Amino acid sequence: MDKMITVQNTINAAIEKVWDVWTLPEHIMIWNIPFTDWHTPYAENDLKVGGKFKFTMASKDGSEGFDFEGVYTKIEKFSLIEYRLLDNRTASVRFENLDTKTKLTETFEPESKNSEQMQEQFCKGVILNFKNYVENFKK
């Protein structure tokens, strides 16, 4: 598939903090939600090339949900994470150090079941929730 969806945001936090919160399961379970009526009850993350990840995302009422899982294909600490999902779609997350801020850019191949607009909105919701969590999380 040639079409890619890109979502980005600038987080008011140092790149080290952004990287840790993005990659540690105890944080992923808190920020990895697109809407307030969703949650991530399970997260595992083996952050290395060939390592697997699996995040269970679901509506709190149990009416919708899915496992977001795949394998890491490239890791450059504080810079880039690339991965392949189980359905062979590819994605990347770039981290750009802007001194006291970090620009995060996520790019992914859309799946065919849901509209690209819905997938983009879903991803924007997750990234915004991530930004809010990082900016309010005290180490």
Image: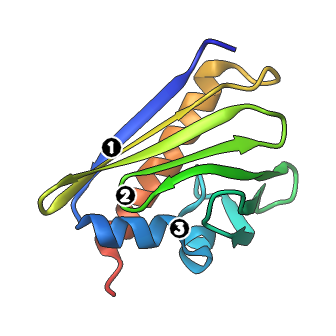
Residue at the image point whose x is 73% and y is 52% from the top: 71
Closer to the N terminus: mark 2 or mark 3?
Answer: 3
Q: CA distance from mark 2 to mark 3?
A: 14 Å
At which x and y percent is residue 9? 33, 43
Please, which residue is most extreme toward the right here? Answer: 63
Q: How many marks?
A: 3
Decide: few, some or many residues near mark 3? Use Cα within 10 Å; few <14, some 14-19, many ≥20. some
At which x and y percent is residue 95? 35, 50
Closer to the N terminus: mark 1 or mark 2?
Answer: 1
Instruction: Report whether 112 appears left or right of 7.
Output: right
At which x and y percent is residue 79? 36, 53
- Foreground residue among 7 and 71: 71
Residue at the image point whose x is 72% and y is 61% from the top: 53
Tell me which corner region of the image, top left, top right, bottom left or bottom right, holds residue 86: top right
Residue at the image point whose x is 70% and y is 14% from the top: 1
Q: Which element is circle 2 on?
A: helix
Tell me which corner region of the image, top left, top right, bottom left or bottom right, holds residue 67: bottom right
- Cβ atoms under marks 1 and 2 closer than 8 Å: yes
Q: CA distance from mark 1 to mark 3?
A: 17 Å
Badge 3 is on which residue?
Answer: 23
Badge 1 is on which residue?
Answer: 9
Instruction: Report whether 108 appears left or right of 67.
Output: left
Badge 2 is on which residue?
Answer: 131
- Foreground residue among 88 and 116: 88
| Up/down of 87 relative to 42, above or below | above
